Amino acid sequence: MKIAILSKSDSSGGGASRVAQELQEQLTLSKHQVSHFTKDATSSPRVPLYGNYAKKIYMLLREIGFQEFIPFELINIYKKHKNEQFDLFHFHDLSTAISPLTLKQLSKNNKVIMTIHDSSIVTGGCINPLKCTYYKTTCHSCPQKREWPFGKRVDMSSFFHSLKKYVLKNSNIHFITPSKWMADFVYDTGLISSYPTIIPNGVDTDKFIVYNKQEIRKKLNLPEKRFIILLSSSSLNSPFKGIKYALEVIKQIKGLDPFILLVGKKDKDISSLLKEFGTFETGYISDKKLLNQFYSCADIFLNTTIADNFPITVLEVMASGTTNVGFETGGIPEIVSHNIDGLLENDISTLCELIQEYTYQNKWEQMGTSARKKIEDNFSLTLFMQRHLEFYQGV
């Protein structure tokens, strides 16, 4: 097959773009011809979504909130399509990169697939509405208007919500979601006519392996005998990641003498709040082997996210033999089984009691083993590829 994959970025751009790149790489290994369109492409198989001139106009429009209106990217897409004659176009994330009108235009004469990684396809722009319910009728007075991915000056949520309603009602798009939770969410809005196909994200179980925790701690110069808590996010201060709740948990289990391992972009404010505990900050890690080693050396991954779909980090941490402990958010219960390969509890006091109980009973290693098996049996890249190829053939 000849396939065009379109996303905001490559793997450096976060979850949806990481999934897009992994899919492109796996399809290429399977001898399919794949072009991956991204905003900042520099070399093959990446293809630029638009030229430098269009990018400058795009950035000016973003200042006033019109960043995803004019479909600049159609010029490069059609130029490449004329030469390659793609069998299908598979979109991943639109926010800050691709106009919804591009999906509508391409779907007139081509097979168009959209993997829904966040809520923005059915909202005025926010990637998760949290407690806001305006998206159920008409977005306006957006409570997140100052947050990414919105523009900086004008609240255009009502306009873009109406635009997306129009596109979804007048386009022939085949939808995928990584989780049942997200499929239910978008389908319940009434903006899409058929229930999405669920294809869970996958993880490379050959690259993310289980290390002996004591040996890898010694190699990484981390405390060999301490109770190590992993906090991980591409942006640790993201309002969606709920780090403030993780800090509350850590303070309540102070008696366990935890050592805090921070993986992700460094943040001075978070570091200062943890100064009474031993900490180590890795910063952003692009090397998957090194990332795997840090994931594998922790006793638990404390994951108090308040807005998530089907996080890749949870898959990678579990593949590394480390237990996910945290809130029952989004599609996470579709990955983690409470009391079997992880802990899911939304009440902080109860969560703290469980962490202390399981630590005293030395249960983390056993649960980490179960977590690894869960990933091998259900969320490998092999299964991820098979499910996509079956879907493509069906389309």
Image (tube, grey):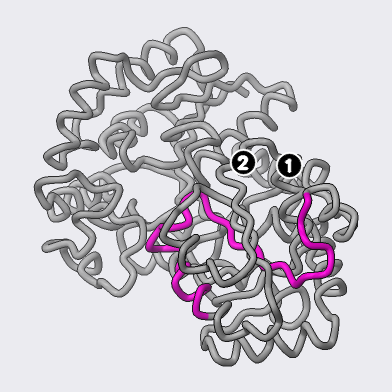
Q: Kindly check if marks 1 and 2 are in contact, taking CB atoms under 8 A apart as contact.
A: yes
- Residue type, mark 1 in image: Leu
Disc 2 marks which residue?
285
The magenta stretch spans residue 227? yes
- Name the residue located 78 percent from the left edge and 66 percent from the top edge: 371
Q: Considering only order in the chain, which callout, 2 or 1, is on the residue closer to the N terminus?
A: 2
Q: Which mark is residue 389?
A: none
Residue sitting at the far front: 276
- Name the residue located 30 percent from the left edge and 49 percent from the top edge: 148
Q: Which mark is residue 290?
A: 1
- Residue type, mark 2 in image: Ile
Q: For this view, does 137 lie left or right of residue 127?
A: left
- Name the residue located 30 percent from the left edge and 74 percent from the top edge: 131
How far across and how far down the image is residue 101, in percent? Answer: 25, 35
Provide the secondary structure element on which disc 1 rests. Answer: helix
The magenta stretch is 221-248
Give the tally of numbered discs: 2
Nearest to the observer: residue 257 or residue 115: 257
How far across and how far down the image is residue 257, in percent? Answer: 69, 78
Callout 2 crowding tier (Cα within 10 Å): few <14, some 14–19, many ≥20: some
Note whether residue 142 is visible.
yes
Q: For this view, does 22 lie left or right of residue 16?
A: right
How far across and how far down the image is residue 158, in percent? Answer: 13, 55
Nearest to the observer: residue 329 or residue 201: 329
